[in-house]
Image (spheres, grey):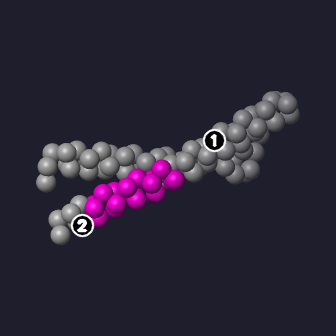
Amino acid sequence: MSKTWYAILTTYMILFFVTGYINFFSNNYFATTPEIIDKITRDSDSSEKMNWVAELLLEDAQTYQDENNIASQSFNIVLGSIVSFLSATVKQKQ
């Protein structure tokens, strides 16, 4: 195998592990359930402040969910690229 082949494979592996980490291990669960939001906002001194904090926590949870969806799609694309690259390599060797 040539150095170019190893460089391409290394690049794919780096992308694979980075998108896999973001997809499977970088999640924000602390603000996803109403019970946890109630615990965080329970000690607030005003209802307006409590509603504001709850709204911010829900927006934060939605942002992380959107990021996770993009990471999942990216992970699938990179995985498909690796499989295509390796199958093309095997096909050329035959």
Taken as a whole, is the magenta stretch helix, strand or loop? helix
The residue furthest right is 47
Image-based side of 16 in relation to 31, left or right: left
Judging depth in this view, the residue of 4 and 42 nearest the camera is 4
Tell me if I can see residue 55 in this picture.
yes
Amino acid at circle 1: Thr
Residue 73 lies in the magenta-colored region? yes
The residue furthest bottom is 94
- Residue plotted at (86% across, 34% down): 47
- Mark 1, residue position: 63
| Residue neighbourhood size for the residue with mark 1, other residues' Cα within 10 Å, grouped as few (<14), some (14–19), many (≥20) | few
- Residue plotted at (65% across, 39% down): 60
Judging depth in this view, the residue of 26 and 11 nearest the camera is 11
Separation of marks 2 and 1 at Cα, in angstroms: 42 Å
Q: Can you tell which quarter of the image residue 38 is in?
A: top right
Query: Helix, strand, or loop for circle 2?
Result: helix
Where is the C terminus found, in terms of image quarters? bottom left
Q: State the extent of the magenta-drawn residues as a range.
A: 72-88
- Residue plotted at (28% across, 61% down): 88
Amino acid at circle 2: Lys
- Mark 2, residue position: 91
| Residue neighbourhood size for the residue with mark 2, other residues' Cα within 10 Å, grouped as few (<14), some (14–19), many (≥20) | few
Q: Position of residue 58 (x, y in %)?
A: 71, 42
